[in-house]
Image (cartoon, helix red, strand yellow):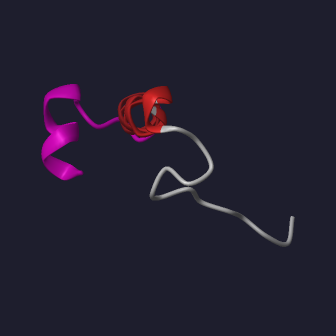
Amino acid sequence: MDVLIFDLDNTLYPAEKQLFNLIDVRINRYMIEIAGIPAPEVDALR
């Protein structure tokens, strides 16, 4: 893969799709399940 495109201002996806909320959930899940960070600490670290 040569190029990654990030939609940081809802240009590619409408805000109604709540893409950023889904990303937040997945980042938190990764931090808990893969990195082993306790769930109550995840939000403070982000």
Q: Quadrant of residue 6?
A: bottom right
Q: Residue at x 38, y 39 (%)?
A: 31
Magenta span includes 32:
no
Left or right side of 27 for 44: left
Q: Percent position (x, y) of residue 8?
A: 47, 58
User: Looking at this view, is 29 or 10 the one in front?
Assistant: 10
Q: Residue at x 35, y 34 (%)?
A: 28
User: Looking at this view, is 14 or 24 the one in front?
Assistant: 14
Residue 18 vs 13, above or below: the answer is: above
Q: Residue furthest bottom?
A: 2
Q: Percent position (x, y) of residue 44?
A: 12, 46
Left or right side of 19 for 40: left
Q: Percent position (x, y) of residue 14?
A: 52, 38
Tell me the magenta residue range.
34-46
Q: Percent position (x, y) of residue 7?
A: 56, 56
Q: Residue at x 44, y 37 (%)?
A: 15
Q: Residue at x 87, y 64 (%)?
A: 1
How many labels were placed on the picture? 0
Residue 16 vs 8, above or below: the answer is: above
